[in-house]
Amino acid sequence: MSNLDSHDDDIRMVRQSLEGDALASRYLFDKYRDRVFRIAYRYLGNREDAMDALQQAFINAFASLSSFTGQSSFYTWLARIAVNSSIDLRRKRGRRAEKTRDQEALELGRLPKRQSESTPEELVERNELEEALGNAIEELPELQKAVVVLHTHEQMSYKEIAEILGCSIGTVMSRLFYARKKLQKKLADYL
Amino acid sequence: MRVCRKVMRLLNAFDDGELHGKKRDFVSAHLEECDSCRFELEGIRRLRKLLEAAADVPDVDSKEWEQQWEAVRENLATPAPRKAPVFLPLWTFRRPAWTTVAAAVMLVVVGVFVGTGILPWSTEAMAEPGIIVTLVESDVENSSAMYYYCPTTDLTVISLVSEQEPDEGQ
C-alpha cells in the first residue's frame, strides 16, 4: 500500500472514529501501537513507563481526534502526542532506578529473539553498552533526546521531525548536531 | 579551518541524506581533500551504528496489546466529568464566619457606590447606573454567593465564599 493510500485510509478511519465507530479506532490503535511504543520506550528507557505513556498517548489522541486536520500524516500527528506524553510522564515520575533494557526484558521473558540467542558474554557486553547508551541519551536535554529518538530509532526525516516538534528544519539539524557531539563524547569508549 | 568548522556542522545532515544541491556538492568536494573532516564523518557513522545496534525494544504479546486497548477504550467510554457548577468557590479555606459576612457587606457597599457613581475614580462604565449586586442563596452549606452584573459592560461576576475545608492531598 502506498503512503498516499495509507494516508487516505487513516483519514477515513479518523472520520469513522469520530462518528463513534469503535472498529475504526481499533484499526488506528493496531496500526500505530508498535511505533508509539518504540518512541515511548526509547524515550523513557523502560517497558512499564513506555506502556503507560503509550496508553496516555492514545487516550489523548482519541480525545482530540477532531483537531487532526489531515494536513500532516496521522502518524506525524500521533508521534507528537506520543513525545509529549513521554515527556509528561518523565516529568511526573522522574528517572527510574536503572535497569538495563535487556535485564528488564530478560526478567519479563520478553527478550527479542536476536538477543535471546546471544551467549552470556555477549549479553553482558550488550547490557553494558545498553546501559551506557541509555545513560547518555537520558542526559540529553529533552528536545535533543526527542530528535535523536525520532531520527535514529524511527528513521524520520528532518522535515517530519520539524513538524512533530513544531520547529524549523534548521533547528532539528542543530539539535541533532549537538546531541551527537554529546553522545560521541559520552560513548567514546565504545566508538 | 573555518571551512572545516562549517562542513562539520553539515556532516550529520550529509550523512543522513538530508543535504541537497550545492551544499551537498560543497561537503562532498571538501571531504575529498580533508582528512580531519573525513575522520569526523567516520565518527558520526560509528555512533550511528552503535545507536542502531541498540535499537531493539522488548516484545509485547497480543494479550498485552489487548489489555492496552481495553484500557484506552474504557477511558474513552467513560462519560466526561460533569461540568463545573455555575457557582465556583473563589477560595476555600478555614476562617471565621464573620469574614464571609464582612466580604458580602463590602461587595454590596462597593456595588451601591459603583452603581450610583459616587466613587471618585469611577469610569464611565462604573458611573452608569443599573449595576445589579445581589446576594444569592447557595445550596452549599456555610457559604454565601454574590451576583454582580454591569449592563454597560455586560460583565457578570458570581462569587461563592465557602468555609469548607479543603480535602487532604488535593
Image (cartoon, rainbow, N blue to C red):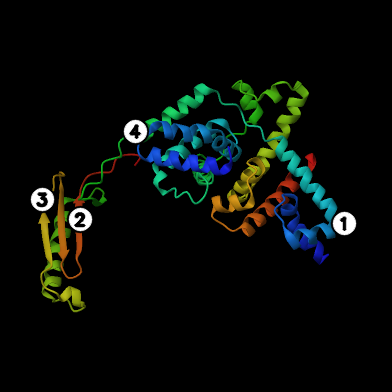
* Residue B38 visible to the viewer: yes
Chain for mark 3?
Answer: B
> Measured from the top left, where is residue B61 in percent x and y?
55, 23
Residue at coordinates 74% horizontally, 60% vertically from top-left?
A: B21
Q: Are marks 2 and 3 on the same chain?
A: yes
Q: Marks 2 and 3, Cα distance to the nearest angstrom?
A: 12 Å
Q: Of the residues under marks 3 and 4, which one precedes in the sequence? A: 4
Secondary structure, mark 4, is: helix
Q: Earlier in the sequence, mark 2 or mark 3?
A: 3
Amino acid on which disc 2 is placed: Ser
Residue type at mark 4 is Ala
- The residue under label 2 is B159
Between discs 1 and 4, the one toward the N terminus: 1
Which chain letter goes with mark 4?
B
Dot 4 corresponds to which residue? B77
For the point 53% across and 31% down, the residue is A48
Give the left or right position of residue A79, taking residue B159 as reference: right
Q: Amino acid at mark 1?
A: Glu
Please determine whether, in this image, residue B104 is positioned above or below residue B60: below
In the depicted structure, whether residue B124 falls above or below residue A37: below
Residue B32: numbered disc: 1
Residues at marks 2 and 1, CA–CA distance in whole angstroms: 74 Å
Label 3 residue SS: loop
Q: Position of residue B51 (x, y in %)?
A: 71, 40
